[in-house]
Image: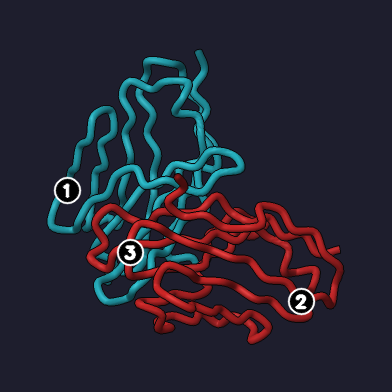
Chain colours: A red, B cyan
Amino acid sequence: DTAVSQTPKYLVTQMGNDKSIKCEQNLGHDTMYWYKQDSKKFLKIMFSYNNKELIINETVPNRFSPKSPDKAHLNLHINSLELGDSAVYFCASSQPDRDGGYTFGSGTRLTVV
Amino acid sequence: DQQVKQNSPSLSVQEGRISILNCDYTNSMFDYFLWYKKYPAEGPTFLISISSIKDKNEDGRFTVFLNKSAKHLSLHIVPSQPGDSAVYFCAASARGAGKSTFGDGTTLTVKP
C-alpha cells in the first residue's frame, strides 16, 4: 500500500516526443511537489501544489506542465522532450506544517534518446 | 547558487563506529533542517529534522546537531550498521517558502 506512487518507473523516449508522469498520494497531505534529480545528483524543486493550486514554479521551461486534478494527484506533462530532460523525477507530498518532512515516491527515470 | 552544500561526496566507516555527515548552508532565512536517506532505485525517506530553536535532536542512533552561527549541521549515526549504507541528503527550508532546498548528497558505506 504505497503512500506516494508514481508511474512509470522507467521511461525511454525519443527527442521531440510528449510524455506524462503520474503521481498519486494516499496520505491525505495537502501539498505535493515535483523534484528533478539531475546527473550531479542535486534534487531541485520544479513545482509545488497546495490543494490543487500552484504555489511554486521554479524557472522550469514551459514545456513542463503540471496538472493537479485533486489534492491526491499531481501529474507532470512534458512536451517536445530534449536530451537535457533526461533525469530522475521525484514526486513528493507533505503537510504544510513541515513536521516529518516529505514523503517521496520511488522516482521516474526518464531517458531521452 | 548552491545554498545547501554537502562537501563530502562519500564516507566509509567500519560497522559499530560513528558516522558523521556534514552539511553547510548559506541562506540565513533557513530555520528548519532535515536529513533524508536514499537507497538505490528508491525515493529519499525522511530521517530526522531540527528546528533552528534547537541545537540538537536525537532519535535512537541518529542525532542531528545544528550550529547556527557557523551555518552548519551534522548527522551522527552511532553505532553505524551495514544497513545504514545509503545516500544521505541534507535539506533546509525557510518558513513560508513552501519548499525544501537539498544538498547533493553524501554516500555512506558501512563496512562489516
Give the number of the disc on residue A18.
Answer: 2
Q: Are marks 1 and 2 on the same chain?
A: no
Which of A98/B27 is in front? Answer: A98
Q: Are marks 3 and 2 on the same chain?
A: yes
Relative to B108, is B23 on the left or the right?
A: left
Which of B1/B62 is in front? Answer: B62
**What residue is shown with label 3?**
A29
Question: Which residue occupies the extreme left position in the image?
Answer: B53
Which of B55/A6 is in front? Answer: A6
Where is residue B69 drawn, in percent x and y?
Answer: 22, 58
Dot 1 amino acid type: Asp
Q: Are marks 1 and 3 on the same chain?
A: no
Label 3: few (<14), some or many (≥20) within 10 Å?
some
Where is residue A2 drawn, in percent x and y?
Answer: 46, 47
Task: Name the quadrant containing residue B60.
Answer: top left
Q: Are marks 3 and 2 in contact (CB under 8 Å)?
A: no
Q: Residue at x 40, y 54 (%)?
A: A103
The chain that hosts pointer 2 is A
Answer with mark 3 or mark 2, whichever residue precedes in sequence. 2
Q: CA distance from mark 3 to mark 2?
A: 29 Å
Dot 2 amino acid type: Asp
Q: Residue at x 65, y 76 (%)?
A: A77
Where is residue A58 drawn, in percent x and y?
Answer: 51, 79
Q: Is residue B68 above or below residue B80?
A: below
Q: Residue at x 58, y 64 (%)?
A: A36
Task: Name the quadrant containing residue A65.
Answer: bottom right
Which element carries disc 2, helix, strand or loop?
Answer: loop
Task: Name the quadrant containing residue A75.
Answer: bottom right
Q: CA distance from mark 1 to mark 3?
A: 28 Å
Viewer-nearest of discs 1 and 2: 2
